[in-house]
Amino acid sequence: MTKKYTFVANWKMYLNFDESIKYITDNMDALINLAQLPDTKIVIGPSFPMIYPMTHMLKSSKIEFSAQDCSTHANGAFTGQVSVKTLSEIGCKYCIIGHSEIRHYNNETDEIVAKKIDLLIDQKISPIICIGENESQKKDGHTFSVLEEQIKNVLELVKIECNKLNGLPIFIAYEPLWSIGSGTIPEKDHLETVFAWLHGQVQKNSASTHWNLLYGGSLSEENIAAFKKIDYLSGFLIGKSSTNFQEFEKIVKKIYYS
Ligand code: PGA
């Protein structure tokens, strides 16, 4: 494997506290070994309360941590929210934003996503920005206009802030809504066109930025190998399959050894 791949385990709210800790204790050595594979980055994204204990349990490993969301405010009277500063203090190096579930359930807009990116960059946390069209948008041939709208602010912001980045990687995860949790993955042609287009967009706007393009949606050990053939794709955002360590390990190894 010559290309570098990042595997982000998006645990969503699947595992409770005890199950998350058990996942780590039961698989500690294998996890540490997985993160030592050359050109392989393993990022775990548990719910907020598990991040701090897990960073301690794995502090001498190469495993890194992601939050699943953050506040749009730096601090203050925002009941229920978690600041980017706190995420940085507890050891988060990444934060997922704009996930379709948050866009849907918390009404997250592209403007909110942009505000979060700004705060994350200030704290040197890499944003993992999720974009993707829904089923009817795909059927109507609107995939690219939807993606264009979703990344417009992101590209502008990263261009303006490029001096602040100092090599901080910025991630864009293409996650078609019709694929998340459905067991259906896009056709190879569709993926090739989307990732070539995304690559063109990010390069056109800020070629010096360390961009990483991820795919997410129904990834499994059965279908992961096909993704290795997609140009410009350098990692994966893995939901359900990542909550079972054996399955997650097989996914990582299939990419590494194929
Ligand atoms: P899934 O979720 O792998 O369970 O489809 C991916 C995601 O929503 O990030």
Image (tube, rainbow, N blue to C red):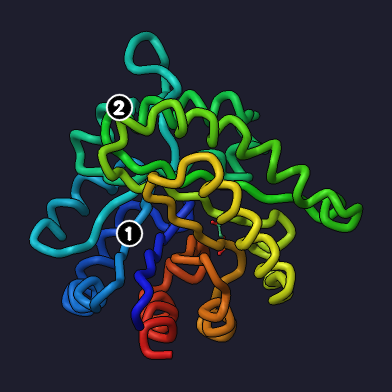
- Can you give x and y, in whole percent of width and height, for residue 103 in the image? 63, 37
Q: Is residue 226 above or below residue 196?
A: below
Q: In this figure, what is the number of numbered marks?
A: 2
- For image coordinates 38% across by 45% down, the residue present is 208
Depth check, front residue: 211 or 51? 211
Q: Can you see residue 12?
A: yes
Percent x, y for residue 233? Answer: 51, 66
Q: Which residue is mark 2?
A: 122
Whichever of labels 2 and 1 marks the residue nearer the N terminus, that label is 1
Which amino acid, mark 2? Asp
Badge 2: how crowded within 10 Å, few (<14), some, or many (20+)?
Answer: some
User: Which residue lies under the disc numbered 1?
Assistant: 43
Q: Are marks 2 and 1 in contact (CB under 8 Å)?
A: no
Residue mark closest to the camera, 2 vs 1: 2
Question: Left or right: 30 with respect to 199?
Answer: left
Q: Residue at x 28, y 73 (%)?
A: 39
Q: Is residue 108 visible?
A: no
Q: Amino acid at mark 1?
A: Val
Going by the image, does 216 lie left or right of 252? right
Location of residue 126 with respect to 226 vertically, above or below: above
Q: Judge the density around disc 1: few (<14), some (14-19), many (≥20) Cα neighbours within 10 Å.
A: many
In percent of width and height, residue 231 lies at 55, 71
Q: Residue furthest left?
A: 60
Q: What residue lies at 8% left-to-right and 61% top-to-bottom? A: 60
Tell me the distance, in whole angstroms, between the alpha carbons under discs 2 and 1.
Answer: 20 Å
Measuring from the top left, give residue 179's x and y in whole percent.
Answer: 69, 63
Q: Secondary structure at mark 1?
A: strand
Looking at the image, is 180 positioned above or below residue 225?
above
